[in-house]
Image: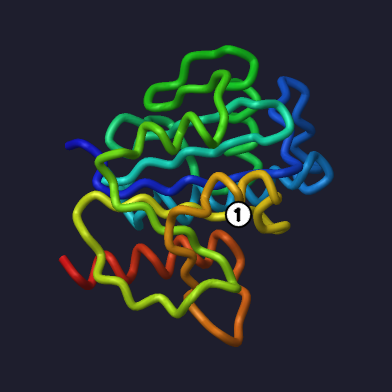
């Protein structure tokens, strides 16, 4: 099954490293945010979302990580375990369904030419769009989007799930899955 949902998360501070300290994921550019997003994006009660992929774009290092739910194996949903897997991937170890390498948000967006792209942002218009089969949601980390990322995303609709609440990135992913799932 090819992914029909894609979550692109732009991480401003996170630095992929083979020296990840599993006891201090927040202190390493907020890698804890990425671990929570992985859990919200890919895990179900008894398996993985086979229709979903996650693309994490690391702005500081001009690299990205792709995790495909239909191919990934050997992940557990807790942050410490995910931090260990990330450390292995960033060190060059091959993990089924995960790819890490050079890349930028601009490159990722160019690959989405056949996808409906929506940017989730607390300052966006109220989310009322119908969900289509191949949808890509672009989200920022705990800092939101850098001005460079905002410029790259300016041609896509900026949408918000709430006018009064700023959700965590991982919560936003879970809400978007709920919206998509109930429309199936």
Q: What element carries label 1?
A: strand
For the question of whether residue 47 can be seen, the reply is: no
Residue appearing at x 79%, y 33% in the figure = 21
Q: Front-most of 108 and 54?
A: 108
In the figure, 109 relative to 132: above or below? Answer: above
Q: Quadrant of the N terminus?
A: top left
Task: Give percent across and percent down for residue 38.
Answer: 50, 46
- Residue sitting at x 72%, y 57%: 143
Q: Is residue 174 above or below residue 25?
A: below
Q: Residue at x 39, y 22 (%)?
A: 96
The picture places residue 7, in percent across and down from the top left corner, at 43, 48
Q: In which quarter of the image is the C terminus?
A: bottom left
* Residue at the spot 35% in from the left edge and 55% down from the top edge: 44
Question: Residue 114 appears in which quarter of the rendering?
Answer: top left
**Closer to the camera in the image, 176 or 74:** 176
Name the residue that disc number 1 marks: 140
Q: Which colour scheme is used?
A: rainbow
User: In the image, residue 172 lies at what x, y percent?
Assistant: 50, 66
The residue nearer to you, when weighing 126 against 10, is 126
Q: Is residue 36 above or below residue 83?
A: below
Q: Where is residue 175 in the image (x, y as percent from the top left)?
A: 42, 70
Q: Is residue 44 among what the camera can see?
A: yes
Residue 69 vs residue 2, the one in the foreground:
2
In the image: residue 88, left or right of residue 133: right
State the count of labels. 1
Looking at the image, residue 5 sits to the left or right of residue 18; the answer is left
Residue neighbourhood size for the residue with mark 1, other residues' Cα within 10 Å, grouped as few (<14), some (14–19), many (≥20): many
């Amino acid at each position: 099954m090819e992914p029909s949902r894609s979550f692109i998360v732009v991480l401003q501070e996170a630095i992929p490293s083979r020296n990840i300290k599993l006891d201090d994921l927040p202190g390493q550019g907020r890698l804890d945010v990425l671990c929570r997003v992985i859990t919200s994006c890919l895990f179900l009660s008894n398996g993985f979302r086979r229709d979903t992929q996650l693309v994490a774009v690391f702005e500081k290092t001009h690299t990205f990580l792709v995790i495909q739910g239909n191919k990934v194996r050997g992940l557990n949903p807790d942050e410490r375990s995910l931090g260990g897997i990330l450390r292995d991937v960033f060190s060059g170890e091959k993990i089924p369904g995960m790819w890490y390498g050079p890349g930028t948000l601009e490159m990722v967006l160019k690959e989405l030419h056949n996808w409906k792209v929506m940017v989730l942002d607390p300052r966006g218009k109220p989310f009322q769009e119908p969900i289509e089969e191949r949808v890509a949601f672009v989200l920022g980390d705990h800092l939101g989007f850098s001005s460079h990322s905002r410029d790259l995303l300016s041609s896509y609709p900026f949408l918000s799930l709430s006018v009064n609440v700023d959700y965590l990135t991982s919560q936003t992913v879970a809400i978007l899955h709920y919206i998509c799932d109930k429309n199936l």
